[in-house]
Amino acid sequence: MKKLLSICLFLFISGFVFGQFYKTSSSYLKENVTPKNLVSDLKTNNKPQLESGQKQTTYIDRSFIGKSNDALSIPGSERRSVSYDEKTHIVLYTYPADPDSYPEALSSGSIVSAYRDVEEMYDDNGDWETHISANPDPSLHHLAFPSAVLYNPQESTNIDNVYMVFSGSDYVNGSWENNYFGSSKIDNTENHITYIPMESENDWVRSDMTVVNDEVYIFGQDFENIGVYGVNQTLKHYKGTTEDPTNGFDWEINTLTPNWLVNETDGYAYALYTTNAAWNKDGSIGYIWMIGVTNESSSYGVYQPQVYYTTDGGNSWNYIELNLEDNEVLVEYLPPWEDENGNQGSVRPSFLTQDRTYPGAVDVLGRLHLFSNVYGSTTGDVENPEEGNWVHEDRLGGTIFDFVIEPEGLDKVYFVDHLLTKCIADTAFGDIGWTHRLQTTKTPAENGIYAVWNDQYNSEDGYLNFPDIYSWGYLWCYDWEGIYYTVNHTAGTIYTGYYFYPSLGEYVIWESSYEVFIPITSSVSPQEWENNDSSIPISHSFVVGVTTSDCINAIPETNPHGTILYVSQNQPNPVKAKTSITINTDVIAPVEIEIRNILGQTISSLNAGILYHEMTVELDLSNENAGIYFYTVIVGEQKITKKMLVE
């Protein structure tokens, strides 16, 4: 019974979303180099070979962290298990213990904290430092699904002054009984843990843990069961404060219950069960949301985000009315509903998707970027969902958008990507599946917001069987807004198709002037996947080398008006011989590319041909000396310059 409950819980909380393959000359592995025979390649230390003309997009490797007791211990994508501290340059990953790997752990309900210096990891020196940060008597407590953050209120560069704060849910004697909140110094001293009894079996603390103005926030929800449904879904904000972290943290709870639309016959609310939240770094504004239909929003006829904002640290919340009907961007990608005669109506995006992941981040302007994959439209009656066009069949898992929201309402919508596969909700790995695990991260300056997810290019059956890591970015650079297009970071690497269950840190890692690193982990190794048994110990690894563009590379030489030109950061970067860029605009026009050295001398010019909205161009720098170079893309009267590094 315990395992059945855990399986149901895991499927309920997991989340996962994906996007379009980045069409570069480094496209994909040849057919005989697939995830199906990768395990044998790894055993013989043979790296998959690419076809002639193909090039690996970047250097990607794994840094082994540790093991959990089984795959059911992997947290959902709404939890934050990864944290990065920019002052000490350490990355933290927190997970339930595998007692065979950690003899000091009393059970699989003990919590492991692992950390490592980023520079050492990228130099491949040393192992992760691991501690059992919570080790309760298993007859009293079984700690599950931890979230964790690094707490460094003094902004010390000394690792000895850094704390970790963690939280999750406690399984006691066959049922979920408590939410737990713990803290300790990074060296595993000054340990504290607090148990707060759940108000019901649905009272979960689990989402978007963060540090805001020296306070630790985490979010959750509660609801009352109505058969297999629920009512009175309540959003919860847990706030941890301390005068001295050596004495632990005190926790208070703020709650919010929207005016949900209720089914008149069966009495359940039209609402999902996960609370999400996001804050800007200085705490001046925060947002909290849940997906559902309220009495106020019922006229739109679909499940959509019910969003609130606060300017007083979560003591009070204000409702944001969102009208997404017939938004000009959504209309381009989603079909309208149709009546029985085929007459088209309006476009109303439905957020009731199989993935059920709705992450967000707040940018430097105080706006919420809420990401979701959405499906087609409905005629407006959630009690009769068979009416109207809900799923566009050639879109499989839906279409990802960035919904930019401010206190006054919807600001704008950005198209992110189409999902190429459907998620697997049941038996892909042992007796569990996975979703696309859409998540967000951002720059410490909050001018770069990135969506990260899993997807698979060219799935034979249309399902996400062998996931890779994809990302898309929004950049705000000195009053100029731009888009960094979708990139498949792991195509052509030795672990292609084996990036299961990724977890993402809230902030990127700034390690150079031309790119940022995404702090991301992956669980389940190729060998464990081949064993196909989710009940045995599984591995966690940090994915080294996942990089994306920053604002330095996004500033155009001229501020475009009207039609906007987008140019991606070159991949790979640094360049050893050849590299590729993607160019996108709304017009059809000739493209010129100039490459200059650091002295401003033009070393090559290229007429790239006619741009039909989007094109990918390969640049050859095999004859150039190592150093910094600049490439300028010119389309009509518009041009954008970006920096690249040649090794």
Image: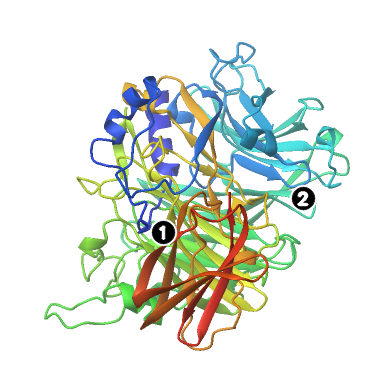
Task: Give the quarter of the image for residue 429.
Answer: top left
Mark seen at residue 16? none
Q: Which residue is mark 2?
A: 215
Residue bearing mark 1: 269
For the point 43% across and 70% down, which residue is it?
583
Q: Residue at x 51, y 55 (%)?
A: 623
Left or right: where does residue 545 sit relative to residue 390?
right
Considering the image in quadrants, where does the N terminus appear?
top left
Identify the residue at image location x=55%, y=75%: 640
SS at circle 1: loop
Calculate the distance from the C-alpha at mark 2 to the C-alpha at mark 1. 33 Å
Q: Quadrant of residue 278?
A: bottom right
What amino acid is labelled 1 in the image? Ala
**N-terminal label among 2 and 1:** 2
Residue 328 is situated, as x and y percent measured from the top left of the image, at 39, 82
Q: Tell me if residue 410 can be seen.
A: no
Count residues near mark 2 (Cα–Cα under 10 Å), then give few for <14, some for 14-19, many for 20+. Answer: some
| Element under disc 2 | strand
The three-letter amino acid code for the residue at tag 2 is: Glu
> Residue 134 appears in which quarter of the rendering?
top right
